[in-house]
């Protein structure tokens, strides 16, 4: 930072990622704020850093800010947000993200669909919703991650 590289999106993104992975979120945010023109990767790093450290609300806030300057979120942005929604109180927020996924055509991305399955498993005990989602995309591209998400849901909710 003292060398003046933090304004560069690539260097700033790398520093931000390092701080976030180490749990130094205030430093990660400070570096992010110093990036002259943050790109999608920079936004994804701060969103993922917040989400992975348990700050789901702040991650959603950054996601909203990301969309204001006209950036289009990608599958990485959405996976990070969905992975942060891990308790019953986050169900409403998770459903809003699911609506965004549908509206902007991300249902064709298997990694996003797998994250949706995992989110619904952790946020509610409604296995029917998980099964219905799984059936919707199973014939398209379901992979071992998809099957594991459904099996994990069954085991956690003691269903055969």
Image (cartoon, rainbow, N blue to C red):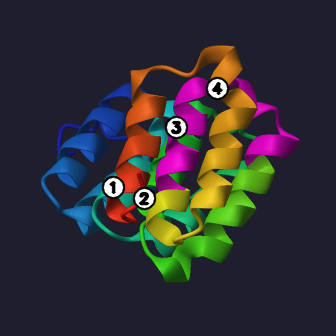
Q: Quadrant of residue 70?
A: top right
Left or right of residue 30, residue 112 in this image: right
Q: Image height check: is 87 above or below 37?
A: below
Q: Position of residue 17 (x, y in %)?
A: 27, 42
Q: CA distance from mark 1 to mark 2?
A: 6 Å
Q: Nearer the viewer, mark 3 or mark 1?
A: 1
Query: What residue did someone put label 1 on?
Result: 155
Q: Image height check: is 53 above or below 10?
A: below
Residue drawn at the location 67% of the way across and 57% of the way down: 129
Residue drawn at the location 81% of the way across and 32% of the way down: 105
Q: Nearer the viewer, mark 2 or mark 4?
A: 2
The residue stretch that appears in magenta: 101-119
Pick whichever, 95 or 38, lies toward us: 95
- Provide the secondary structure element on which disc 2 rests: loop
Q: CA distance from mark 3 to mark 1?
A: 17 Å
- Provide the secondary structure element on which disc 3 rests: helix
Query: What residue did someone put label 3 on?
Result: 114
Pick whichever, 159 or 113, lies toward us: 159
Q: Position of residue 111 (x, y in %)?
A: 52, 30
Left or right of residue 129, residue 121 in this image: left
Point out the residue furthest to the front here. Answer: 160
Left or right of residue 155, residue 99 in this image: right
Point out the residue furthest to the bottom here. Answer: 89
Q: CA distance from mark 2 to mark 3?
A: 19 Å
């Amino acid at each position: 930072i003292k060398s003046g590289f933090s304004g560069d999106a690539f260097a700033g993104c790398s520093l931000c990622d390092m701080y976030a992975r180490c749990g130094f979120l205030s430093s990660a945010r400070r570096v992010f704020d110093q990036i002259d023109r943050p790109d999608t990767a920079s936004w994804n790093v701060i969103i993922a850093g917040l989400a992975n450290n348990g700050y789901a609300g702040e991650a959603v806030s950054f996601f909203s800010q990301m969309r204001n300057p006209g950036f289009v979120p990608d599958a990485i942005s959405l996976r990070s947000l969905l992975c942060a929604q891990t308790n019953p109180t986050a169900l409403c927020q998770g459903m809003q993200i699911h609506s965004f996924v549908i509206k902007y055509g991300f249902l064709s991305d298997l990694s996003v669909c797998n994250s949706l399955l995992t989110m619904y498993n952790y946020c509610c005990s409604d296995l029917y919703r998980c099964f219905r989602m799984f059936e919707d995309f199973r014939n398209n591209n379901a992979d071992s991650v998809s099957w594991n998400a459904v099996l994990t849901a069954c085991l956690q909710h003691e269903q055969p």
